[in-house]
Image: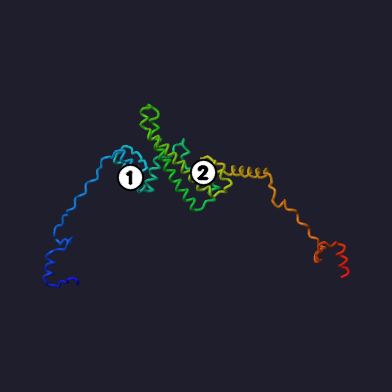
C-alpha cells in the first residue's frame, strides 16, 4: 500500500499540527517528565575484606601522606613546583645562603681541562645546567645548616628531636648533589678512551670531576697496560702449522713438466734428440 501524504490545509495536516509526535517537545513547553525510576546511589560504605578479596586488589600500595601543612606553604610551593622560579629570584635566594667556609665539597666539581677540550657545545651546555642545579642544592644545604647549627650548642636531645626532619632533608639533598656529579661524569666519560674507563670511574669527587691528578693516573694506567702487553705470552699463529712452500726453481721456468714415472736423465736425453 502506498504511504498516505497530507496536503497543506487538509484535515490530516491540521491533525498533525494539533498532536505533537512522540518524543518531540514543542517549543516553549516544559520538558517531559520521564517515568523511568531514578537509579539509586552507589553505597560508599567500606566493603568487608572478604568482598574486597573477591573483587581483587590493585597491587599498588598508596604512599602514606603526612599531616597537612599551613595553607600558605601549600599555595606558595604549588606555584613554584608547577611553574618554577624566575632566574632573578633563584639567584637572590642562592646568594642569601652561601656555601660555608668549612664545606668546600658543596661547590660543584669542575670539569678537568683535558676533558673540557674534548666536549662539544651540547655537552658543555648539558653539564652547565646540572652544575646550575647543584649550586641551588648547595644553597639549600647551607640554609639548613645555618638554621640548625645554633641549636646544636645548648639544646638537649629532646629539643633536637624536633629538628629531625631537617636532618633528613639535609641528607637527601646531599645525596641529590652527589647524584648530579655521577650523572655529569657518566655523560662525559663516553668522550674518553674506553681503555681508561675503570681508572676514571674510581676517581673521588673533589675540586675536579675526574680528580685532580687525571693526567698522571692516565699515564700510569697506560704504562701498566703496556707492561701487561709485554709480559703476555705471544700467541702461536695458526699459519705456523702449515708447511713452508717450496721455493721456486728458476731453472724449471718455461721447461716442460716431467712426465709421471720418468727419470730425470731419460727426460733430458729425449730433449737433446729433439
Q: CA distance from mark 1 to mark 2?
A: 34 Å
What is the quadrant of residue 158 in the picture? top left
**Residue 254 location (% of width, % of height):** 80, 66
| Residue for point 21% across, 47% down | 40
| Residue for point 13% across, 59% down | 29
Name the residue furthest front: 1
**Residue 164 location (% of width, % of height):** 38, 33
Chosen colour scheme:
rainbow
In this rendering, would 100 be left or right of 66?
Answer: right
What is the quadrant of residue 150 in the picture? top left
Screen quadrant of the C terminus: bottom right
Q: Nearer the viewer, residue 26 or 62?
A: 26
Q: List the residue tagged with mark 2.
A: 209
Screen quadrant of the N terminus: bottom left
Question: Is the residue marked by circle 2 packed among few (<14), some (14-19), or many (20+) residues within 10 Å?
Answer: many
Q: List the residue tagged with mark 1.
A: 78
Question: Which element carries disc 1, helix, strand or loop?
Answer: helix
**Residue 113 location (% of width, % of height):** 54, 47
Q: Is residue 28 above or below residue 96?
A: below
Numbered circle sitting on residue 122:
none
In this rendering, would 94 be left or right of 213?
Answer: left
Question: Is the residue marked by circle 1 packed among few (<14), some (14-19), or many (20+) residues within 10 Å?
Answer: few
Mark 1 or 2, which is nearer the eye?
1
| Residue for point 61% across, 43% down | 221
**Sequence-wise first label, 1 or 2:** 1
Q: Nearer the viewer, residue 125 or 195?
A: 195
Question: Which element carries disc 2, helix, strand or loop?
Answer: loop
Q: Are marks 1 and 2 in contact (CB under 8 Å)?
A: no
**Residue 88 location (% of width, % of height):** 38, 47
Amino acid at each position: 500500500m502506498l504511504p498516505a501524504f497530507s496536503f497543506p490545509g487538509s484535515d490530516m495536516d491540521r491533525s498533525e499540527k494539533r498532536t505533537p509526535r512522540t518524543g518531540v517537545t514543542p517549543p516553549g513547553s516544559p520538558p517531559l517528565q520521564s517515568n523511568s525510576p531514578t537509579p539509586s546511589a552507589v553505597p560508599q560504605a567500606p566493603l568487608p575484606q572478604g568482598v574486597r578479596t573477591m573483587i581483587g586488589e590493585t597491587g599498588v600500595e598508596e604512599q602514606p601522606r603526612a599531616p597537612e601543612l599551613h595553607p600558605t606553604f601549600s599555595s606558595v610551593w604549588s606555584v613554584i613546583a608547577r611553574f618554577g622560579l624566575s632566574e632573578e629570584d633563584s639567584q637572590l635566594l642562592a646568594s642569601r645562603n652561601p656555601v660555608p667556609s668549612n664545606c668546600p665539597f658543596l661547590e660543584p666539581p669542575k670539569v678537568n681541562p683535558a676533558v673540557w677540550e674534548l666536549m662539544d657545545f651540547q655537552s658543555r651546555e648539558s653539564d652547565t645546567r646540572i652544575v646550575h642545579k647543584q649550586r641551588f642544592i648547595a644553597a639549600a644545604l647551607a640554609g639548613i645548616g645555618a638554621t640548625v647549627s645554633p641549636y646544636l650548642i645548648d639544646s638537649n636531645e629532646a629539643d633536637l628531636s624536633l629538628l629531625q626532619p631537617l636532618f633528613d632533608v639535609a641528607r637527601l639533598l646531599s645525596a641529590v648533589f652527589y647524584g648530579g656529579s655521577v650523572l655529569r661524569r657518566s655523560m662525559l666519560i663516553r668522550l674518553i678512551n674506553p681503555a681508561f674507563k675503570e681508572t676514571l670511574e674510581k676517581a673521588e669527587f673533589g675540586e675536579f670531576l675526574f680528580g685532580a691528578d687525571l693526567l698522571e693516573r692516565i699515564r700510569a694506567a697506560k704504562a701498566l697496560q703496556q707492561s701487561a702487553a709485554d709480559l703476555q705470552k705471544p700467541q702461536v699463529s695458526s699459519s705456523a702449522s702449515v708447511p713452508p712452500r717450496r721455493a721456486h726453481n728458476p731453472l724449471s721456468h718455461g721447461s716442460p713438466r716431467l712426465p709421471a714415472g720418468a727419470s730425470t736423465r731419460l727426460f733430458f736425453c729425449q730433449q737433446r734428440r729433439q
